[in-house]
């Protein structure tokens, strides 16, 4: 499997748990951390945790390693490191505060609408 398949798996997993405003950024040539970032948010601590848990479970089911998950207990900003794909799952209020889309504004946004239900 390749990075695009992992990206699709993670986006669909977030969408399955009703993540809002899912954005995928192409970080190739911009960040040494990952090739893709996924940014989304939930409206409650429980939803944020459910989104992160689903992304992790779907990655594992498809034989991808989850290198690290940070922030799960606090459920304000959960980072899921899947290697070449890093998912940022925010609580709604935290997302607007950190505004990663602006921070990484030079990264192209990928069209993921076909992946969303």
Image: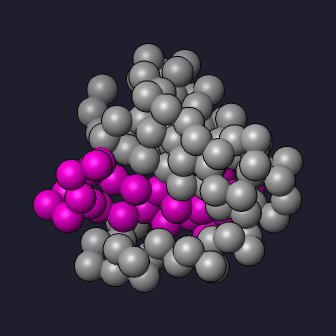
- The colour scheme used to paint the residues is one colour
Residue 33, horizontal then vertical, whole percent = 28, 49
Q: Specify the quadrant of the image occupied by residue 92.
A: bottom right
In the displayed structure image, the side of residue 38 where residue 34 appears, left or right = left
Residue drawn at 62 percent across, 79 percent down: 97
Q: Specify the quadrant of the image occupied by residue 96.
A: bottom right
Q: Is residue 114 visible?
A: no
On screen, 95 above or below 84? below
On screen, 49 above or below 18? above
Residue placed most toward the observer, 45 or 21:
45
In the displayed structure image, the side of residue 71 where residue 24 appears, left or right = left
Residue drawn at 30 percent across, 26 percent down: 1
Residue drawn at 23 percent across, 58 percent down: 31
Residue drawn at 74 percent across, 51 percent down: 75
Please state the extent of the stretch shown in magenta in the rendering.
Answer: 13-41
Which quadrant holds the C terminus?
Answer: bottom right
Q: Specify the quadrant of the image occupied by residue 71.
A: top right
> Is 20 contained in the magenta span?
yes
């Amino acid at each position: 499997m390749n990075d695009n398949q992992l990206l699709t798996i993670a986006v669909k997993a977030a969408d399955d748990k009703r993540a809002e405003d899912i954005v995928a950024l192409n970080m190739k040539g911009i960040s040494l951390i990952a090739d893709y970032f996924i940014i989304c948010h939930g409206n409650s601590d429980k939803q944020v945790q459910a989104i992160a848990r689903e992304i992790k479970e779907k990655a594992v089911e498809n034989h991808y390693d989850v290198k690290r998950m940070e922030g799960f207990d606090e459920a304000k900003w959960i980072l899921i490191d899947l290697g070449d794909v890093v998912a940022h799952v925010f609580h709604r209020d935290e997302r607007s505060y950190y505004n990663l889309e602006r921070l990484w504004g030079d990264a192209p946004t990928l069209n993921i609408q076909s992946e969303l239900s």
